[in-house]
Structure formats: structure tokens, C-alpha cells
Amino acid sequence: MRKMLTRRTVLSGLAISLTLPAFRAGAAPIDAGTEFKLVDGSDADQSAKLAAALNRAASQGRLLLLPAGTFTVADIAIPGGVHMIGVPGRTILMTPGDKRLAHLSKADGVLIEGITLAAKSQQIATGVNGLLEIEASTAITFRQCDFRNAAGNSLAADGSAVTIEDCVFDGATAAAIHSQNGLGLMIRGNRISNCGNAGIRIWRDDDGPDGTIITGNRIDKIDWRDGGNGQNGNGVSIYNADGVVVSDNVISSCAFSAIRVNAGKDTQIHGNTCLQSGEVAIFSEFAFSGSVIADNIVDGAATGISITNLDKGGHLATCTGNIVRNIAPSSATNPDTRPVGIYAEAETVVANNTIENVPGVGIAVGTGPYVRDVTVAGNMLSQVQTGIAVSVVSDAPAGPVTISGNTIGAGAQRGIVGMRWDVMASDDLVRDARKYPNTSIANNTIG
């Protein structure tokens, strides 16, 4: 049967074509193995051969085909307008020493598919920012590529727009993907594991719009090789970057956080599964504002979700529909972390979350004077030591705290309490609410 040509198929084809480099109609592909004599398994440097093949493909608008095999190269300059395809899992570009494997600078319209990029030895490949480095480039796409054994970052981009999809990242000593001053990356469907300091970093020199989308990735086993108290050890790390979306990822076994937002504005974190985090699973901290944290699963962490740092301007968030369970008594990476399900400080709604098995406080509102305009409503808490704890120090700001319609299941030692720093001021804030006029408590069920 003849296929009908519809407006939808035309527009779909147009959208796909706009994402690819421009190629000359009818031009035959370039076979780099045959035409440029790439030699499989040779220890000889084949950088000049590959560079010549890339430049010809770019200048002639022709597809570049790389054969299966392992080819030794270093510091290859990839020009704009290249579409390079290898045999997935079998075309390997290997850098032997202390140089990056390849870089792109002011290159636009590059598509690289089915190629493994690897460092032969991390020990001698020191002082390298990225196995592959990108600078001031746009419309760069990597698809079904493998990045392995990088000293530093597997892929480091600065001031660039990059799409990274269906790729594997394994064994970077720093981060799998590091973007500085990005122009809106699309990072989707990748598998990231065994990284020294981070899975994905979206950082900026100064705060400003970024717009990166991170979705559908699997991130596992992230260490904190370079130490610190949170700058390392995170599955997804966002710093000074606004308008970032982190959705539908599975993130497990991170030394610190599965997702950490530091001074990011208008961040959306939704639909993620965060397993076995070493510190706070989802963290919105310092000068953040406008964080949406919704419909995530947190299973295993020292604190489930923390929305904090009113003292640094951190404010304005919604925390809704999350499941938080199996909180650890302490953190092996940060001994200051307390066993809390959800923590919030300023201009924040904490609503309709389900919290289970916390050997501490299910929901904590503020600490000392750092609490302002928080609503805690419609949450279900079970197997918690203390249901809800609210800071009630006398010098707290005047913003109200409203606690209503929550259910604290049987087994809790305490229901709703008031805290002066680490000292319990009231073991029953329902009874003592009149003593604290900024606290409104109504219609809660305490089993």
C-alpha cells in the first residue's frame, strides 16, 4: 500500500533534517578506512589521517564512515559541518597519553554517531579538562557513543549548545558531562556510571539563563574523589544555572546528592527515582529561587529533600507529591546531616507527600530564626520518630507557618513539636500553639 504523505510526516522530516549538518545531495560517503588507510590496532599515531578525513568530509559536505577497529589518535580538531558514523561498540578512538582525544572550537552542525572515545591510561592522561572538549559551538550532537576511562571529564563543553543522547559514560575521574556557561543542552537517555566526582554538571561562571534539559538518564556510582561538603559526589549538579529541567531520571549510589541545585532559579525536578544517596537526595540550597520538586521517589538517604538557606536568599519552592522513605540515621560523607524526610525554610509549600521510615523528623520547618512563610498540608507520615518539627525561636521572622490536614501515623513518639534550635520548646505544638502566634495548626490527624 502506498504511504500517504501528510502534513505531520512532512513537518517531522523537516524537523529531523534541521538537526543534521548540511550535505551535498548525491555525494558518496567517504570511507576513512579505505581512502585514508586507518590501521586497526596500530600503536602508531593516526591523528593526521583522521584529521585529513574530517576536513575533506566537512569541505565536501560528505558523510564520513569510520570502520570497526581501534585507532590511536590525540587532540583531533573536529571541524563544523561533519557527520561521522562508526560501528557502535566496535569503532574505538583511543588517546594514549596526556592529551585530550578531540576538540571542537567555534564549530557548528556536527553529528557523531556510534563511536567509542577512550583514554588508554588515566594515570598518564593528567591535566586534561575533557576527553572531548567543546568551545563556543552550536548544534553539536552525539548519539550512541561511548566515553570511557577519561582523566578529568568525559565531555567538557563551554559556551556551547550540545545534544547528548543514548550514550554510555563510564569511568571519568571528574564528571561524565560538564557544561560551563551552556546554551541549553539536551541530555537524554544516557547511561552514566563510575565517575570520580559527578555525573552531570551544569555550571555557570555567573548566574543566568541556561535552559538545559536532563531527562531519561541512568546515573549510578558517583564518588567524591576531590572531597568537600557537597560540591562533589552528586548525580546531577546545577550551579548558577537558571531554567534547568531534571526529569524522569534514575539516579543511584551517589556519595552526596542525586540532584543538587545551588543558586539556580526556576528549576524543575520531577519524576526522578533517587536511590541510596549518601547525604541529601534532592537539595535546593543557597541563593536558589523558584524550585519545583514534584513526584519524585527518594528511597535511601541521610535526608530526603532539603529546601534551605534563607540566610543566603534561598526561597520560593513547591515540594509536592513525592515519596520519601528509608532515611538513614546518619551520613557517612557529611556527619552534620540529620535524619529528616523533608526540610523547608522560606516561601515553600510542602504538600501531599508520603514519608515513611525516618529515625528522626518526618518534616522539619526551619531552624533557629531561619523560617518564613511555609505551608505544610496534606502529607502522610508513617514510621517516623517525630512527625513535624517547627522552629519557634523568639527572634524568628514574622512570616506564618501553617500546618494543616496532615496525617501522622501510629508509632510516632511525637506528633507536632516546636524547636528552639536543637532544644525542644514544645512537645505538643497543637496544645501550645497559642504561645507561638506565627504558627497556625489545624485539622491534623495524629495516630
Image (tube, grey):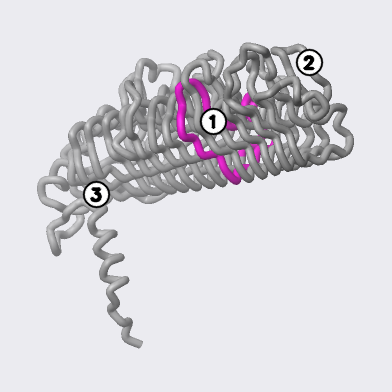
**What residue sits right under mark 3 in the picture?**
83
Region in magenta: 274-299
Residue type at mark 3? His
The residue at 70%/43% (across/down) is 378
Chain-order first, disc 2 or disc 3 = 3
Label at residue 347 = 1
Tell me residue 83's x, y (percent): 24, 49
Task: Compute the Cα span from label 1 to label 2.
Answer: 24 Å
Chain-order first, disc 1 or disc 3 = 3
Q: In the rendered image, which quarter is residue 40 located in?
A: top left
Q: Is residue 401 above or below residue 90?
A: above
- Neighbor class of circle 2 (other Cα within 10 Å; few <14, some 14-19, many 20+) is some
Task: Compute the Cα span from label 2 to label 3.
Answer: 64 Å
SS of the residue under disc 2: strand
Count of numbered labels shown in the rendering: 3
The residue at 31%/71% (across/down) is 8
- Neighbor class of circle 1 (other Cα within 10 Å; few <14, some 14-19, many 20+) is many
SS of the residue under disc 3: strand
Q: Is residue 15 above or below residue 114?
A: below
Task: Compute the Cα span from label 1 to label 3.
Answer: 49 Å
**Is residue 285 left or right of 161 when viewed as pictured?**
right
Q: Is residue 404 above or below residue 204?
A: below
The residue at 80%/23% (across/down) is 432
Tell me residue 358's x, y (percent): 77, 30
Does the rendering let one see residue 304?
yes
Tell me residue 157's x, y (percent): 32, 31
**What residue sits right under mark 2 in the picture?**
424
Nearer to me, 121 or 198: 198
Residue type at mark 2? Met
Nearer to me, 327 or 287: 287
Is the C-beta separation of discs 1 and 2 under 8 Å? no
